[in-house]
Amino acid sequence: MKGEGETPFLQIRDLVKTFGDFTAVDGISLDITESEFFTIVGPSGSGKTTMIRMLVGMDSPDSGDIMLKGRRLNDVPANRRPTCMVFQSLALFPHKTVGENIEFPMKIAKVAPAERRRRADLLLEQLRLPLSYYDKGVNQCSGGERQRVALARALAYDPEILFFDEPLASLDFRLRKTLEKELKDVHRETGKTFVYITHSLEEAMVMSDRIGIMRDGHMVQVGTPAEIYNRPVNKFVAQFMGEVNTIEVTRAGDNTVKSLSGDMVYTVAGDSFDRFEKGFLVIRPEVMKIGPAAEALPNRLAGTLFNDYALGSRIQYQVRGADDSTWLVEKLQDNPFDGTLGDSVTIGWQPKDSILVMD
């Protein structure tokens, strides 16, 4: 832990970047701590790529400051910053061997050949590549192996921060899942600061210490995966975090809200109700109950079991309410709901599982 009053590792202050009349990044301020795995996530056009291009030195901000350990980096060229970028394209040298790719930054830094080889071998081992790959052509490597080579080359720079621009986006699902865990392991082993951008919330949840969610050039919410999942600040964040049940509601009374599309009144709990007047009630599918388990709950309604979807370890059920509303309920695959499509069912949830957001 850093001492009180100590300068944060990476400071971003009021960062702005425009392209003509379009503001890609609009006054973002953020602190990132040393050795943190921080992920910037957002939909296409949210500004996350522009943000990381400024942090790595590929673009210059129109205003604001980027500070690393108290040193202003705005005017420092990318090749003179103690940072390194791993691109989605990887940018490996296609006609060089794995070893030559890894050693390239050390060769530029005039490191002696024996020391370059020693460090390249260490990096191969760390990235779980056989030492025999040193002489293997990089074009002979699989997609996952090339990802590991690109990361090894980035670590060879011994940067203070590694930036990642959606490096797993082009990989198939199974390989992406494997590399997500490996990246988190490498982060833990090296103690380096990782700043990662992705459009995939699932990637962010698996790997990150903290997540920053961007929308329209603004940082909408910053927090741990658990904080963002359980306490989203608005409807956009709640829905971006995955499929949810969302109802537009208004305050009705003590710890109750009323649906604007019907006469249903729901009981809620939590500090957020103290400031709530009108907005949205969010209930995640995994906290919903269905069938006998729902019949005694304070919040419940009747509907028809319309469909079900197998989601690996989970099954998701779609229930149509009498008012034509659609609800999602999830159960574990080894504990499915014993019902038939078309059955009348009761669904419900506990007040503590209600999330209220203002917009």
Image (cartoon, rainbow, N blue to C red):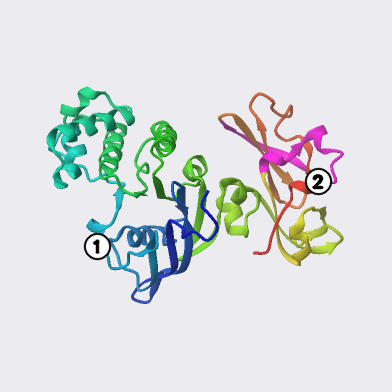
In the image, the segment drawn in magenta is: 285-311
Q: Is residue 93 visible?
A: no
The amino acid pointed to by label 2 is Leu
254 sits left or right of 207 in the view: right
Q: Spatial distance from mark 1 to mark 2, Cα to Cα?
A: 60 Å
Task: Please state the horizontal and vertical placement of residue 357, each as a whole percent of the image.
Answer: 68, 60
Farthest-out residue, bottom: 21
Q: Give above or below for 51 relative to 231.
A: below
The residue that label 2 is drawn on is 301
Name the residue rendered at 56%, 49% in the picture.
224
Which residue is located at x 16 percent, y 41 percent?
A: 111
Question: x, y (%) of residue 326?
Answer: 68, 48
Q: Does the magenta stretch include residue 225?
A: no
70 left or right, relative to 103: right
Q: Does the magenta stretch include residue 295?
A: yes
User: Which residue is label 1 attached to?
Assistant: 77
- What residue do we see at 84% from left, 63% from top? 252
The C terminus, quarter of image = bottom right
